[in-house]
Image (spheres, helix red, strand yellow):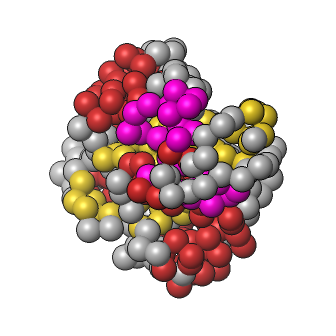
Amino acid sequence: MLELYGKTLSSRLLLGTAQYPSPAIMAEAIRASRTEIVTVSLRRETAGAGSGGGFWSLIRSLNVNVLPNTAGCHSVKEAVTTARMARELFATNWIKLEVIGNPDTLQPDVFGLVEAARILSDEGFEVFPYTTDDLIVAERLLEAGCRVLMPWCAPIGSARGPSNLDALRSLRGYFPDTPLIVDAGLGRPSHAAIVMELGYDAVLLNTAVAKAGDPVRMASAFADAVDAGHAAHEAGLLEPRDMAVPSTPIFGKAVLT
Amino acid sequence: MQLTINDEKREVSAATLAGLLVELDYQGDWLATARNGEIVPRDLRSECRLHEGDRIEILSPMQGG
């Protein structure tokens, strides 16, 4: 079982709620993914429209935990204020903390991220920081009060999959007891399986599911891949070998020449 | 008085943030508010007096990744 800030979860897949063809398909994909945590955001409401209310009641009807994000925030102040607003609105201390440093790569501003994480942790927030795969930044985030880390494996929405396996392996090795969730960059179920086989605790997906030809089937495919990768890690993977090793016993082989 | 509400300049007569939400027909319990970059919690909206040029943000739950 996965434990994040004291909450025990059986699913190791976190799913975003953006970019689906329709709210109904989003809801169906959430069910098919077997996720227990979905990410949401805060955006400007139009007077008299109540659009946020409709979305919010749909999410609540799905009986999942909500992880609000600070997506699009480029400064510590913006991210901190957004987190405070999200806490009031969604009635949760959880926050997926994003402080974006570059508009093209959506690379986290790790300096601002650590600063915001400290402010929010001191205020009782339970921070899920969207970070890079940098070890020292990870250390600073833990010092700042984070008890979960969410490194990217490639830029958000790029679907490139794990581009630096060595870095992901190091993070896992350095922080064996911290829940590590790969957030961003996964494009296909095999990517999710790869990071789960490395021993990652969970993955966070959005675009790869929402923009698939059939988001509902893709959600289910990712769920299977996450489960398979996790089971494989727990089962103990065979390390690659330089030479062939016969699988059929040599002993007892007939001599037929 | 003129305020900037969700990045749009508006002429309004409400004296408080709570009054502003009523005046502009923002209903529902799913709104979060900020004035000049600082959160104004729901309970404090009726005490939050508005001033010329204030920047108000009115947010609600939306899709996110």
Indicate the quadrant where residue A5 lies.
bottom left
Residue in the image at 81% along x and 44% along y: A104
Residue at the spot 72% in from the left edge and 53% down from the top edge: B51
Seen as rendered, the residue at the extreme left is: A252
Which residue is at a point 47% across and 25% down the rendered structure image? A50
Residue A38 visible, this angle:
yes
Q: Quadrant of residue B39?
A: bottom right
Q: Is residue A159 above or below residue B44?
A: above
User: Eyeballing the image, is A137 above or below A230?
Assistant: below
* Image point (25%, 62%), residue name: A7
Up-down: is A209 above or below B7?
above
Was residue A41 drawn as part of the magenta stretch in this picture? no
On the question of residue A130 being in view, the answer is no
In the picture, residue A144 is in which quadrant? bottom right
The correct choice, above or below, for B18 with respect to A182 in the image is: above
In front of the other: B57 or A117 = B57
**Is residue B46 or residue A119 the one in the foreground?**
B46
**Which residues, given as a range, are shown in magenta?**
B19-42
Determine whether, in the image, residue B16 is placed left or right of residue A223.
right
Answer with left or right where residue A138 lies relative to residue A194: right
The reply to whether the magenta stretch includes residue B29 is yes
Count of marks overlaid on the render: 0
Spot occupied by residue A236 in the image (x, y as percentages of width and height): 31, 61
The image shows residue A59 at horizontal and vertical percentages of: 34, 33
Residue A39 on image: x %, y %: 45, 43
Expressed as whole percent of the image width and height from the top left, the position of residue A36 reads 29, 44
The reply, left or right, for residue A58 in relation to residue A20 is left
| Closer to the camera in the image, A115 or B45 | B45
